[in-house]
Image (spheres, grey):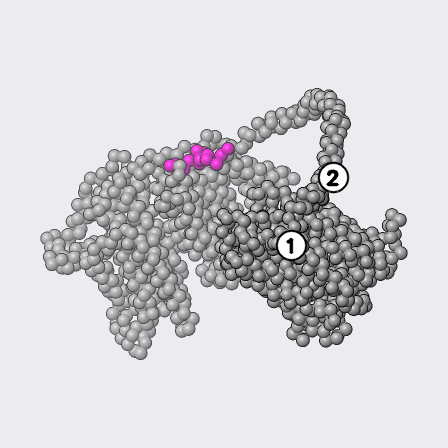
């Protein structure tokens, strides 16, 4: 019998004579806390990784002072942020200003609830049957937070940034969701675990049956939309330091700024993890012969490769203009995504599983 | 003493959130705050759907109402108010109290009808939640095919209409 | 053969083509080919070709000894009092002859007009009118019923009016047009009454059905008079008006105010012959018995007209007026021929045909002369024979034909008329002889003054007309010469074709022929003597018999008499009626008006205080209510929604309380 | 166990708050917000009744989806109208939009 979180909590509750129907919520709560700490850890080292990778790409060393190889650098930065004065702009709309970072961060964190880190129920906090839909729904919430932040700051750079953010995020949410549909169609399930299971097996003993095989176009669309959704550099026009003085988070400092930062890197990890799940077989090994490596390592490995790709793109490409961004989204990505759905429909129709 | 189950407790909490934020939506002066509370209210409604084990609908509720409609409203709000004015207090109508008895009266009527006719036997005995996505999909593409297609046409027409309405007339001639 | 029979089924196209040309010219105006002239010529030329084919069909039927049935076809037209009336065409030998005459002359005249009307400011309109005339005239010719005949007849009259007044800037042209229209209308009233009478008795307007009813009509009377002669005379009144017979001839000389080709086509060759054609077409109505009263009247009117016009023509100086009186005179001859009965029918219609050719020739020639000299007064002309050779020779031939010189077409036809008259009525014969003599005389006078001798007015530099005008003259001159040979006395083809009843041709009579030729030569001789050799001074007549000269020069004072006995009394009656109207009728009206005003004052008071009071009260109440209800119309959407919910609440509340 | 009346009562209350918002707001966007609240109330009713009466057919949920579709279309067109009005009148206070008023 496997030792699972649910089992442990049920055991504890039985000892403490707490009604059994409180178990499930508590499990969710504990899982959430675990996920939260996981995110904090991941983000800390993603930031470090980003700085290192950018350093290498730009032919410099990167952080190397705090701790061995600068590994503690981000922790130091975080501490610094927490210690900083929390400035409230003079004419700001107080409560929206405060809750905006929370609205942005909470959904980014909620997405982790459905991501399968490994095989079986214990490696996913809550394997929802509507997983993919849940992801798209949750990912649409941060926009409100960003707009609120820009609005409440009472600063024209912030407002412009939030305008751009609203336009960009709403626009790229559509191709993102459309690109997530073909794996659902192929797997016949919206559950992420179901989608991973559907990608088991190999063709001709070599090629993994990942959805990438038929979904190269979908994967490309997803990755581009994901770049925009997590506002990485070619599409980071809503922050655009050189134009808008950091956009919607111009007026933010201290802990609130840290939350935005956290959400951004959490988002980067999220979109990569989803891409790995939907297109690259999630925690499945690249070949059954390699299944001695635990699934969680496969998953994290694939995710990290994708994150590296994102960072690579981020540090090489220049920023695009607003109108280019919008027209690319509406006139290229969405039609292509629709075409991809039609193509996938044909695949499902003529090659049923 | 009637025991309150966890579900009932959650329903109470969610209802409180929905109604409280809805009342704030109706009465707050700052329209931007109204919008935030509207989003909260929508989120509450999604919670109600979850309680009713309509998980698909809950996700759609979040996606459509929060992700689309609220954002759209914020967008419109920003475009229809002078930038750099967080003070966008909105007065209510001249006789803003006049609708109050009307609303209360309609509530009374509805409540009376529901309480009388919402049968005692209609208690949720099917504790087992049914996965809804497949059933809804089946219904949409078989029995409700025509409304489904009509809805898609409606959306298309609404989209085209919204673009035309909101488009700025660049040329001098009115045509 | 089969083809020709088939062709007759297209007879209805003959009047339709010029009508189409008319419409096309109206639509295209000056932008049309040749400013519309080519359209008109094309229309009439295609009618001409079609007519030739139809005529060939008729001739081939008639000459091959078949029992000839006229080509006829009709379609439902309308219903009058339960009687269906059909419209269609009816083509027999008489129709064929008229088709030949009308289309030939009309085509030649239209070609001639291209030159004559050149530079006119209403050039397209002229061709439109003349196309309309051709259409109307052709439909008159082929009509198979009297109603269509009458309609075409009136249409012809209308185009005549339009063309006489074509240069309406000239007051004289305007007056002439009105005069022509009104005078012919007098006859048309008779025609129409005759038509109604025949329709009443025969219950049909179709010609053949009418004729079939004649025996039944013989016994009928109307107002104590026998119905058939009355109907015949009424129809003849129409013919008198249209063919300018005594006493309704006064319009024709004035009609010369129109363009000369119009005079040639309408007022010499075709339209005025329509009266003769009417009599010929309706001949069964006239000749219901061998010497009917109707025929006597026709003959009498004919000879009176012939003589009267011929005498007037001898003293006229306007070239076109001379020809106009000559036309009246010749029309009188035709009527006379028709009136003497028997083979006079054939003779009169034969003369119609030959006369159409040479009179059209004469008029076109006179047009050419006017075109070349710029004047219409023969006293200012002279010596034109050298300057206008084509015009001169063709004119000479036509004059010979008109005078009835042997072996010209006029000789054959006139001789035949005189021959019939000789056998029927000696008085008419001798009077006709006098008319023939006068005809030769005044034509010689015309030739002498206009073409022979020396130019009298040195300022006129005459020149020959363009070819487009002289070519038709040549064609008509040839026709004037040869057309008579189909009536060669001993083997009369024309008589074989056009005859009434079983009348046998009267054998050729040397007496009559010699007398006729003699009178013609006598007239020429006298004219030669007076106007060329001056053996007798031209003015001796004027000096010795001034009253007679004045009588003739003033056309027997017809216009003055009509003025005095018709127009002036009419004015008087009008003035009287006006006075009656002013004094008595207006007085009555005014009296009634005063009473009305008085009553309306009373009613006005009632209206103002009682009726208006009630209305205003209702209005005030409505206004008050409206003012109250206006508070609900705030124009604010939300208020309306509020009211809506209040209403819902009330309805549901009522429902719940029950 | 949650009785059906609770849902219906919640729905009725939400609906009436929506009516109040529609009737008392002057801002056009505020009115649209009220309408959305009313639509949500109707949706709660539909879903609850579907759950309690025919838990396997889900017609109520299908209808709720149609209502959401209509709501999305309505919001798009409504906000486009609001923007268009703002462009012409410089405000969206519906009490003052009186061009069409006699």
Majority secondary structure in the magenta region = loop
Residue behind mark 2: C566
Which chain hosts label 1? C
State the CA–CA distance, disc 1 to disc 2: 42 Å
Give the label on residue C431, or none: none
Quadrant in which the N terminus of chain C appears = bottom right
Residue at point 51% right, 46% down?
A: D8
- Position in image of residue A165 (x %, y %): 30, 49
Residue at point 30% right, 78% down?
A: A205
Whether residue C240 is visible, yes or no, is: no
Query: Which stretch did the figure color magenta?
Result: D90-102
Return the residue found at the far front.
Answer: C535
Horizontal arrangement in the rendering, residue C512 relative to residue B168 (left or right): right
Label 2: how many residues lie within 10 Å, few (<14), some (14-19) or many (20+)?
few
Q: Would residue A238 be counted in the magenta stretch?
A: no
Quadrant in which the C terminus of chain C appears = top right
Which chain hosts label 2? C
Residue behind mark 1: C529
Query: Circle 1 sits in a helix, a strand or a loop, which is it?
Result: helix
Residue at point 72% right, 36% down?
A: C568
Q: Would residue D100 be counted in the magenta stretch?
A: yes
- Disc nearer the start of the sequence (1/2): 1
Q: Which quarter of the picture shows residue C75?
A: bottom right
Query: In the depicted view, which residue is nearer to us: C657 or C436?
Result: C436
């Amino acid at each position: 019998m496997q030792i699972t979180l649910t089992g442990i909590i049920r055991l504890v509750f039985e000892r403490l004579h707490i009604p059994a129907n409180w178990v499930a919520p508590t499990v969710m709560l504990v899982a959430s806390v675990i996920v939260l700490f996981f995110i904090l850890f991941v983000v800390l080292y993603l930031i470090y990784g980003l700085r290192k990778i950018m350093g290498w790409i730009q032919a410099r060393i990167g952080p190397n002072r705090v701790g061995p190889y600068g590994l503690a650098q981000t922790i130091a930065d975080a501490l610094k942020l927490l210690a900083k004065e929390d400035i409230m702009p003079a004419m700001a709309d107080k409560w929206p200003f405060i809750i905006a970072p929370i609205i942005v961060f909470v959904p980014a964190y909620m997405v982790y609830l459905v991501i399968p880190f490994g095989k079986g129920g214990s490696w996913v906090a809550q394997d929802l049957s509507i997983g993919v839909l849940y992801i798209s729904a949750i990912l649409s919430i941060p926009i409100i937070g960003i707009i609120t932040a820009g609005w409440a700051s009472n600063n024209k750079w912030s407002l412009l940034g939030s305008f751009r953010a609203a336009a960009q995020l709403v626009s790229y949410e559509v191709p993102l969701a459309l690109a997530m549909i073909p794996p659902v169609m192929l797997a016949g399930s919206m559950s992420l675990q179901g989608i991973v299971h559907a990608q088991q097996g190999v063709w001709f003993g070599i090629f993994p049956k990942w959805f990438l095989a038929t979904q190269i176009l979908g994967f490309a669309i997803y990755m581009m939309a994901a770049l925009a959704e997590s506002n990485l550099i070619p599409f980071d026009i809503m922050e655009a330091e050189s134009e808008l003085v950091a956009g919607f988070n111009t007026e933010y400092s201290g802990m609130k700024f840290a939350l935005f930062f956290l959400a951004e890197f959490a988002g980067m990890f999220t979109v990569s993890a989803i891409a790995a799940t939907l297109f690259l077989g999630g925690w499945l090994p690249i070949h059954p012969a390699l299944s001695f490596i635990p699934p969680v390592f496969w998953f994290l490995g694939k995710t990290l490769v994708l994150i590296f790709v994102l960072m690579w793109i981020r540090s090489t490409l220049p920023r695009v203009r607003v109108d280019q961004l919008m027209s690319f989204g509406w006139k290229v990505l969405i039609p292509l995504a629709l075409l991809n759905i039609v193509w996938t429909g044909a695949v499902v129709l003529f090659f049923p599983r | 003493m009637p025991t309150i189950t966890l579900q009932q407790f959650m329903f109470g909490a969610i209802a409180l959130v929905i109604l409280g934020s809805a009342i704030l939506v109706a009465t707050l002066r700052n329209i931007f705050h109204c919008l935030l509370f509207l989003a909260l209210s929508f989120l509450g409604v999604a919670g109600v759907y979850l309680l009713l084990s309509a998980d698909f609908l809950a996700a759609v509720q979040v996606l459509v109402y929060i992700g689309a409609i609220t954002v759209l409203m914020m967008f419109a709000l920003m475009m229809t108010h002078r930038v750099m004015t967080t003070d966008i207090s909105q007065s209510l109508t001249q006789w803003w109290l006049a609708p109050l008895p009307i609303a209360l009266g309609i509530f009374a009527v509805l409540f009376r009808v529901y309480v009388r006719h919402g049968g005692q036997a209609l208690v949720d005995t099917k504790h087992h939640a049914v996965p809804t996505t497949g059933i809804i999909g089946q219904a949409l593409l078989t029995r409700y095919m025509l409304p489904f297609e009509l809805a898609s046409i409606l959306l298309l027409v609404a989209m085209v209409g919204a673009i035309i309405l909101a488009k700025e007339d660049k040329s001098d001639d009115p045509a | 053969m089969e083809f020709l029979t088939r062709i007759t089924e297209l007879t209805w196209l003959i009047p339709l083509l010029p009508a189409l040309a008319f419409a096309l010219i109206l639509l295209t105006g000056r932008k049309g080919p040749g400013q519309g002239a080519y359209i008109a010529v094309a229309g009439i030329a295609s009618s001409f070709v079609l007519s030739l084919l139809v005529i060939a069909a008729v001739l081939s039927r008639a000459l091959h000894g078949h029992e000839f049935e006229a080509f006829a076809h009709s379609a439902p037209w309308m219903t009058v009092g339960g009687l269906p009336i059909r419209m269609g065409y009816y083509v027999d030998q008489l129709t064929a002859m008229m088709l030949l005459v009308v289309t030939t002359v009309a085509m030649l005249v239209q070609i001639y007009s291209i030159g004559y009307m050149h530079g006119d400011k209403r050039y397209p309109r002229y061709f439109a009118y003349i196309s309309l005339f051709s259409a109307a005239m052709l439909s008159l010719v082929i009509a198979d019923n009297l109603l269509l005949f009458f309609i075409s007849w009136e249409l012809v009259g209308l185009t005549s009016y339009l063309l006489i007044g074509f240069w309406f800037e000239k007051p004289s042209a305007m007056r002439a047009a009105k005069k022509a229209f009104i005078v012919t209308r007098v006859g048309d009233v008779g025609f129409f009454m005759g038509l109604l009478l025949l329709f009443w008795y025969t219950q049909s307007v179709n010609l053949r059905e009418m004729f079939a009813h004649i025996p039944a009509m013989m016994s009928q009377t109307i107002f104590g008079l026998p119905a058939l002669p009355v109907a015949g005379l009424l129809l003849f009144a129409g013919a008198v008006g249209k063919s300018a017979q005594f006493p309704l001839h006064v319009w024709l000389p004035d009609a010369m105010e129109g363009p000369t080709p119009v005079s040639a086509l309408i007022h010499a060759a075709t339209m005025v012959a329509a009266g003769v054609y009417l009599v010929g077409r309706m001949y069964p109505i006239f000749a219901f018995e061998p010497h009917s009263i109707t025929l006597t009247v026709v003959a009498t009117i004919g000879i009176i007209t012939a003589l009267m016009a011929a005498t007037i023509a001898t003293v006229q100086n306007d070239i076109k007026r001379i020809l106009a009186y000559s036309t009246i005179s010749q029309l009188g001859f035709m009527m006379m021929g028709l009136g003497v009965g028997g083979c006079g029918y054939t003779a009169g219609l034969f003369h119609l045909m030959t006369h159409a050719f040479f009179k059209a020739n004469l008029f076109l020639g006179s047009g050419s002369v006017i075109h070349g000299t710029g004047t219409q007064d023969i006293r200012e002309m002279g010596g034109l024979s050298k300057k206008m050779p084509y015009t001169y020779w063709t004119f000479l031939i036509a004059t010979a034909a008109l005078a009835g010189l042997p072996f010209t077409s006029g000789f054959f036809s006139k001789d035949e008329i005189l021959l019939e008259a000789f056998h029927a009525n000696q008085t008419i014969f001798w009077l006709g002889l006098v008319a023939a003599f006068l005809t030769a005389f005044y034509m010689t006078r015309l030739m002498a003054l206009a073409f022979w001798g020396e130019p009298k007015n040195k300022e006129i530099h005459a020149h020959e007309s363009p070819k487009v005008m002289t070519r038709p003259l040549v064609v008509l001159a040839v026709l004037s010469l040869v057309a008579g040979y189909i009536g060669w006395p001993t083997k009369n083809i024309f008589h074989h074709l056009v005859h009434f009843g079983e009348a046998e041709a009267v054998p050729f009579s040397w007496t009559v022929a010699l007398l006729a030729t003699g009178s013609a030569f006598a007239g020429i001789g006298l004219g030669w003597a007076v106007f060329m050799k001056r053996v007798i001074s031209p003015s001796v007549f004027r000096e010795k018999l001034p009253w007679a000269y004045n009588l003739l020069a003033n056309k027997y004072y017809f216009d003055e008499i009509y003025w005095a006995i018709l127009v002036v009394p009419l004015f008087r009656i009008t003035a009287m009626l006006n006075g009656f109207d002013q004094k008595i009728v207006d007085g009555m009206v005014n009296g009634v008006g005063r009473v009305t005003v008085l009553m309306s004052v009373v009613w006005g008071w009632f209206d103002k205080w009682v009726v208006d009071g009630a209305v205003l009260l209702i209005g005030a109440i409505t206004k008050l209510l409206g003012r109250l209800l206006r508070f609900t119309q705030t124009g604010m959407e939300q208020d309306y929604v509020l009211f809506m919910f209040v209403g819902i609440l009330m309805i549901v509340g009522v429902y719940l309380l029950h | 166990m949650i009785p059906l009346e609770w849902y219906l009562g919640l729905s009725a209350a939400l609906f009436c708050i929506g009516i109040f918002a529609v009737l008392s707001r002057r801002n056009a966007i505020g009115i649209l917000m009220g309408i959305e609240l009313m639509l949500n109330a109707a949706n709660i009713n539909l879903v609850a009744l579907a759950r309690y009466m025919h838990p396997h057919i889900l017609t109520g949920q299908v209808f709720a989806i149609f209502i959401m579709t209509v709501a999305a279309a309505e919001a798009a067109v409504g906000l486009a109208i609001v923007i268009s009005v703002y462009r012409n009148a410089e405000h969206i206070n519906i009490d003052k939009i009186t061009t069409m008023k006699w």
